[in-house]
Amino acid sequence: MDKKIDYLTVCYINYDLIFLQIKNFKKRFKPESYRFIVVDNTPPEFKNQELIDELINNDSIDLFIEISDSKITTAIDRKNGWDEGLSHGGALEEGLKYCNSDIICLFDSDFFILDNDMNEYIWDKFNNGYLAVGVDFDMNPFSKKIIDRNPSEFLNIPILIGAFYTKELAKSSRLSVSTEETEASYQKGGTDVETGFPLRKYIAKNKLKTMTWNQKYGSHARSTQYITNEYDKIIAIHGWAGSHANNRPGKMNELRNIIDSHK
């Protein structure tokens, strides 16, 4: 069994997050324990070739994949939040073509691991029969109402903000979301078609052995979340620093300070 874990994320306009990921990976993990794969889904008009070249030549990135025809996605103001990038799932699907390790982590570029022993923790979980471990759907003050509509489709099932899967499971379902699916879900009172929702529904339907971590969020949907494991240990943060709504210097400084202060 391959003891490396493939970490796959998508860059969309905010290259600073990828550089911060590199810094964090170097701080947390031994190089031989992981492969870091980045898909650049930035639209052509926002690409920064100087930064791209720097990332391509960075020894900490094992593979940098460029999508040349990405389109700008418009953030749509909705009753329950923001619809922020229906092409994200497609970019992850492209990256999965290059993932070969037995365990794959699919994570947002603003999701940062703070646990230096995360890889060992994950291998222990998977050696004990878990097929997926990660962040819960209960990600902000709006999500509880969505979960309550159909709890069985969410209980103990991780989502792609930050989650580890067996290679077979990660590649078993579609991850992309169509505009029609999103529109139909909003009509029901709040979206339950997050990126990768077919994979979540596949896990629920087949009653696979998976688990989720706990999340602590602030008073509004864009507060930085602290992720804790079953022992109440802080293991990660989700910064909500996506390019549409929260890509600003104050947020980036906050994330840098958290990463620097967490030994």
Image (tube, grey):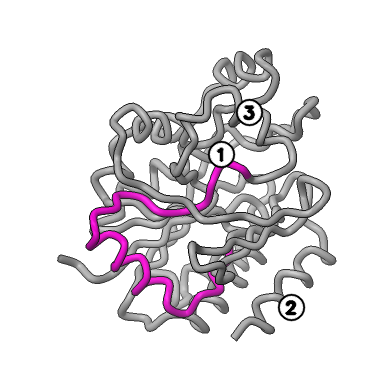
Q: Given contact means CB atoms under 8 Å apart, are the residues at marks 1 and 2 in contact?
A: no
- Callout in the foreground (3, 2): 3
Which residue range is magenta in the image?
Answer: 112-138
Q: Amino acid at mark 3?
A: Ile
Task: Relative to 189, say whether 205 is above or below.
Answer: below
- Callout in the foreground (1, 2): 2
Instruction: Characterize the local packing of mark 3: few (<14), some (14-19) or many (20 or more) Cα atoms within 10 angstroms.
Output: some
Q: Amino acid at mark 2?
A: Asn
The residue that mark 2 highlights is: 257
Distance, label 3 to label 2, CA atoms, is 33 Å
Q: Secondary structure at mark 3?
A: helix
Quarter of the image that includes the N terminus: bottom left
The residue that mark 1 highlights is: 70
- Label of residue 125 in the image: none
Task: Relative to 243, say whether 185 is above or below.
Answer: above
User: Residue 248: where, in percent of width, then height?
Assistant: 82, 59
Q: Amino acid at mark 1?
A: Ser
Task: Relative to 174, say whether 233 is above or below.
Answer: below
Q: Is residue 101 visible?
A: no
Q: Of residues 250 and 208, which is closer to you in this image?
A: 208
The residue that mark 3 highlights is: 146
Q: Is residue 191 visible?
A: yes
- Callout in the foreground (3, 1): 3
Q: Of residues 238 and 60, which is closer to you in this image?
A: 238
Query: Residue sitting at 57 percent across and 66 percent down?
Result: 236
Q: Given contact means CB atoms under 8 Å apart, are the residues at marks 3 and 1 in contact?
A: no
Residue reaching furthest to the front? 231
